[in-house]
Structures are given as structure tokens and as C-alpha cells.
Amino acid sequence: MNKVLLLALVTPVTFVLSAPAQKRMTASPTEITYGKNATHIGRITADTLYVVSGSTYSFTVDTPEDKGLVSTNLTAKLLPLQLAAKDGSVPAYRVTGKGGRTKEDDYLVTGDRLTVTSPRSKVSKAYYIVARPMALSGRLSLHKSQHTLNTPGDLVLYFTAGQRSPDATVKIFLPPGINATLENTTVNVIGRGDVPLKDLTTQSIGRVGSRYSYSRVGEAVIGKTTSGGLVLTFAHLDLRPANGPDLKVVIRGVKPTKTGDYPFKATYTTSRPEILISAGVGTETAVLSVTSTVSDFERVIIKEMPYRETPDRYTSATFRWSTKGLPASTQLLQSTDGGRTWTPASDKIDIAKGRANITGLQAGQLYTFRLWVKEGTRKGYSNPAYFFSGKMDIKSFGVSGSGEDYTDKINAAIDYLHGIGGGTLLFSKGVYAVRTVHLKSNVYLFVDQGATIKALKGADAPEATWFSDKKYRSGLSPTDPGPYSDPENYLTKQDVGHHYFRNTMFFGERIDNVKIIGTGRITGDGNLVTGDKVMNNAPDNRADKMFTFKLCTNLEIGGLHRGEDLWYDPAKDEPYYILKNGDRDTTPDNMLHIDRAGHFVLLATGTDTIQVHNTYFGKYSTANARDIYDFMACNEVTVTNIYSKVSSDDIVKPGSDCALGFTRPARHYRVRNIIGDTNCNLFQIGSETADDIRDICVDNIYVLGANKAGFSISTNDGAHIKDIHLNCGHTGPLHARSKMFRTTTPFFISISNRARILGAEVGQYAFHEHGRKRRELLVKNVNIGQVENILINGVDCYE
């Protein structure tokens, strides 16, 4: 078995809670506590250190077949990474085993000793080590770590288990004063969607076959603890899929009546490969601080789509706070020097209603704002809120734009903007090479004209998976028998490119309000792969996607928005905008240019409210991309003004697969002005059709060539496809009939029997069809799909 397994725990917001200054000063330099990532530390007493011992299943794409059982024990060498000194110093650590032998690469076992030595006084202290069977610690965090006394508000908790398991149980312990009920509390399990606790047992599990062992998402009960608090117990959860936070719990109308710290704790229990319980310490704890002063002062984030630059977009800011009825003497203060000096902010400030709109800010400044309550029960200063009045140039983070690998500095800049509440990161003229950029909520990337972001080899590795096996991980065709041998393995139900998300140029998971916009260029530069067998490549050559979004909301990708329609000039082989007077604008310099994007330009899975628009896929790039825009189980999607040449697969594709570990229906697409040629389909529904797809309207498509279809609809996996309209004017006025040139099959509509869904069972069947003997793999326990209400209007087909 592998030496050690360190699992990354991902949560939207992580608060590091430090001890009060007085306690740090009085703590001994040899006293240790839990580090920031103490996944293997079960308990720390005055003289004893308890560490995790156990096993789990974890497969990378390189794990040999049937070798996925790995140890979760910790080695002596890695132990210091999980500890911290209580006084904030960095002590020396030494682990010894029997006979006083120093240990490094060996596992920790009961009877080992940890010696902690102060870096200043050289005083040492020994801890007895006990290895105890436990699950790896998960991570519990609060969306906001402060709450205002006697003020109702939502309390949001995130919990992620340290290791994956079917049939898992999670317990979240609430302190006295935090009142949760089955009605006022919602839960979101692995991204399936928020439901009240009382409705968890009836929440849809998606489309499944009869060989899926779960009939419900889970069960939730609320009990009391001996301390007077509550415990939320979530049972029978399938936590094999990893989609960011396993549980998002929202308690509505929380109104603490006492100031001070409110401690929260979580534990979870696994069922396979062994029954283990996590310790509920360290990273599985969080603290809410309740203050009498205003603690929920915040900037209101602009989330409109599409992006538009108005004269005051970056020189005005809006703020709000939930504590109403503050005294009239309350002031809103602002600072431009990091809080050293403050001046009153003036403009539209309504203290009683808890809202302020500040305009006329000086461009290019980082502002800090806070409330000053001069009297009454809220007397004192509020928490701060920040606003940068402009686009923040990436070059201010030590990036020159000379084409070097800037991945770490770009990710640090995104982290910084996310930490101040969001903002726009400007890529000014230059060349910026990246491996994988990690996107964050409320951070926009603006690629200016003359700027190029290009991909390098060595993007993030494909994520480890659980309860899988080798033949499912490197590109097996879903029409082969193998993917059905384990009916519950969600990784087998779609092509390999769909169920690995992290091997990408830009990555976002469970984030909100992100834009990648501008008039510059983004290129894979030949370093993004298009082949199905991508996982057989060398480890530094497995990136096959440009933009990957998983369970996100409010996403925009494209150039600067224009209201005019895009169409095509065959004489110039270029797109143009149709002006209001009927003239042509043949200089579309507002478009975002993309080329050589790999298997997918965009793979959006379980992501809602998307706009992609005004993008130009260069006709001189010989390996431009396979799929351009793939929307798997996405809703509320708008695609407009796209020009694409040299695509080898679909240009716009709605579908629904099992890559999340569950299915979601797809609804409400508005697609308009799509121009391009392709080796496959310009527009296709499917072939991934694990759940229903409805309400899709497409207007004004111009097919320059398609070796498959111009307009294709397939249901292969049981989905009901309904209400699909081509050129019916539902996205706006029709400016032209749709056109299809050199299209092998202008319209293709099919129903087949693959049922690549959880719980499907198949068999080999021999039969005769039109006098020919056939032998096919057919599904036994899932109904075939349906296609109905397809309206096709005003299409001219040539050649």
C-alpha cells in the first residue's frame, strides 16, 4: 500500500482562527496544537498525541488495476506539516521509535515519541504517540465568522469529509443559542441543491436504473446534546463523488442573544473499506464570534450580465448591513491608506435602512470602508469592507507579461481580489503563460487587446477518484461492456474527458459570479490535448480543457457585448455585425479570440445562469478545438454571436451526464447567431442524455460545413427531449433564414438504448434488422428516451 494519503479538502471559504494574543504569549514554545491542515491528528493532550490509522480507496489515473486500497497512516516525516506551536514559533520536531531510532519515512505506530524543541530556549518536551483507527479529519467552516448580537441572519456552514465513502453519516454539533429546525434549515448534499431538512428524504436522486442501491439522497434528524446545544445528523449519504463541500447547511433567522464565541464541531463515519469515525477536532471545528458592534457590513457585488463598462462602474460602490435603526449620528468612514487615517464618506447614505451608495471615488485606489456607531447598543466600529476603484493590473503583482510561467502569481492575485470581496483583474498588453488558473467567486479576468494568455504543459493532475478501477479511468468507450460491470460507478457513464475536471487551463468549482472577458487572446498554444486517450499521456500532458466549471453559478465568457446580431460574409470569409441601418460592421474588434483549446473550450457541468458571447475561434489554427461549448446538466444558458472555424466536434452542445455522481435535467437555452464549420455537428443535443433536456430555442445558425449534422438531437440514455425550436424567433427577431452548406445530414434525430446512468444493467442481444444479423449491447432495466415537439422553420440547405 502507498506510504500515506493526503487528501485535499476544498471549501469555498476558510477562516483561520487564531488564539487570543494573551494566550499566545503565555503558551510554552513546546506546546503544540493542530495545524491548518491537520487531517491526520486525532487529539492532542498535555503529553499524548493521537494520530489517524486506517485505509481507504483512492485511484489516480496511474494506479495499477486493483491497487487502489491505500493506507491513511501518517509518516514521521510528514507529521510536522500537521502541527503548530501554540506560541506561534517554529519548533524542531523529532520522532523516535523503539530503541530511540529516529524515524522519517516509516509510519507512526503506538509507542513512538515526538520530541518538540523550542528554537530559542532549546527546551524540549516529549509526547507519547498513539495510532488509533480513525477517519481522516474533514473540514468544517463558516461562511462568515462574525454575527451581530440580537440581529437575525443566515448562518452558513460547509463540511467536507476527509475521505470518500458510500453510506456515510455526518454529525454537526451546534452550540446553545443556535436554533435549527427541520423547517428553518436547508442542506445541499454534494451539490444536488438546497432543500429543507424535512424534505431531504424526498429530494430527487436523479434518473437511475433499478441496480442503484440508493432510493433517497439521505436522512436528517435533529437531536439535543448534553451541553444544551443541538446535533444535526445526516445519514445514508453517498459521499463517493467529490464536488467541493459535501454539505452546505444554512440555518435561517439565527439571532444570538449573548456576545462571545460559539463553537461548532463536526464528525463523520465511513462504511467502506472499514467503519471509521473522525475525531471532531482541529479542522473539524469552527468558531462564530458574536459581537455587539455591527459585524455584517459588506459591499454589494454587481452581478449583471452581460458585462458593461458604465462611466461609474469602478468609481461607485454600494454597501449594506442588516442592523437597521442605528442612531442618526452613525457615520460611514473611508480610508485610502489601509486604515491609518479615516474621513467621512458622503453621498446617498441611509443609516436607518442599512444601505449606502458612494460615488465619485478616485480611480485606481484601494478603499477601506467601515461604520462608526457613536452611541447606543451598537457603539463602536463595524468590520471593514473593501473596494478597488478600477481594474487591478496583473503587473502590479510582479508579473511582466514577457511570456514566463505566471501561474502562481496570477493565482495569488485572484486570491487577493477574492479576499477583498471581489474585483477585476486586468491582463494588459503582454504574454502570460499559465498551467492551471484557479478561479474564485466575484473575481473577473479582463483580457485586454494585445494581451495573450497561453497554456503551458503541466496543468493540475486529474483528480483522484474513489471506488473506481483502472479500466474506467483512461478512456474506455461507454458502449463497451466494461462500464456497466459496476452499475454504480458514475465515472463510467460518459467519455473520460467529461469526468475529470482539474486537468484544465482555468478551473472553478462551486463558485459564483465569474467572468472571463475582453478583446485579447486565449490560446492552448498546442499544449491542450484533443484525444480520448488523454490519460495514457505523460503526466505533464493530460490537460484537455480550456475552461472547466463544476456546479457554479453566474458565469460569463466572451468579448465586449454588442446588441447587434453577428452574421457571415462568404466573399470575405469573415463575420460581421448587422447595424441598425442595415450596414455591415466588418471590424469586430470587440470579440474575444480563442484558439487551440483542446477537447473542450468550455466544459460546464451542473452550472446555471451562463452567458457566452462574441467569441472568435481563429480559422488559421489547424488544431483549434474539438468541442467548443459543452453544457452538461446546465440551466439558463445564453449563447450569442459565435464564429468558429476548424472545430472537429460540436460547437454548441447541451447534454446531461453522470460526471457529478448524480444527474440533473437541463432547461432553458437561448442560442443565437452561431456561424462555423465542424467535423461533427454545429448544434447537438446529446449524446450524453442521462437526464431530461427541454426548452431550447436556436435562431440564425450558419453552417459552413458539417461532416455529421447541422442540427442534431440524440437521446441515448433514457432522457425525454422536448420543446426544441430552430429558427422560430424565440430569442429575438429573425434577421435571416438559417443556412446549411456542405452538411452530411442537415437534421439528425435519433433514439438509442445505451442508458449510461447509475444502476443500469446490460446484456448482449442478437437479432435481425432489415435482413442483417446484429449483435448489440442493450440495456435491460431502463426505458428508452423520447423526443417530441421539435419545430424546424426557415432553413436553407445547400450542397
Image: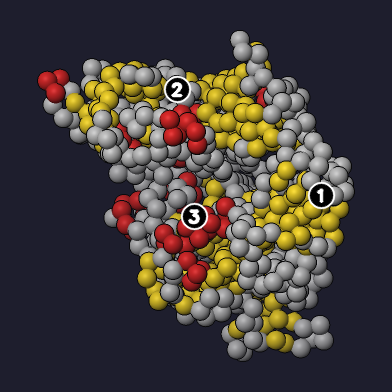
Left-right relation of 773 to 563:
left
Left-right relation of 201 to 22:
right
Q: CA distance from mark 3 to mark 1?
A: 40 Å
In front of the other: 575 or 317 = 317
Q: CA distance from mark 1 to mark 2?
A: 47 Å
Q: Which residue is mark 3?
A: 438
Q: Secondary structure at mark 3?
A: strand
Q: CA distance from mark 2 to mark 3?
A: 29 Å
Task: Point out which mark residue 330 bears.
Answer: 1
What's the residue type where badge 1 is placed? Answer: Thr
Q: Residue at x 25, y 28 (%)?
A: 124
Cβ atoms at labels 2 and 3 below 8 Å apart? no
Q: Is residue 762 visible?
A: no
User: Which quarter of the rendering shows the C terminus?
Assistant: bottom right
Residue 556: quadrant of the picture: bottom right
Left-right relation of 262 to 160:
right
Q: Position of residue 167 (x, y in %)?
A: 51, 22
Q: Secondary structure at mark 1?
A: loop
What's the residue type where badge 3 is placed? Answer: His
Q: Position of residue 364 (x, y in %)?
A: 63, 71
Q: Residue at x 76, y 70 (%)?
A: 360
Q: Secondary structure at mark 2?
A: loop
Which badge, 2 or 3, comes first in the chain's sequence?
2
Q: Is residue 758 above or below residue 372?
A: above
Q: Residue at x 37, y 50 (%)?
A: 461
Q: Badge 1 local density, few (<14 within 10 Å), some, or many (20+)?
A: some
Q: Is residue 413 visible?
A: yes
Q: Which residue is mark 2?
A: 278
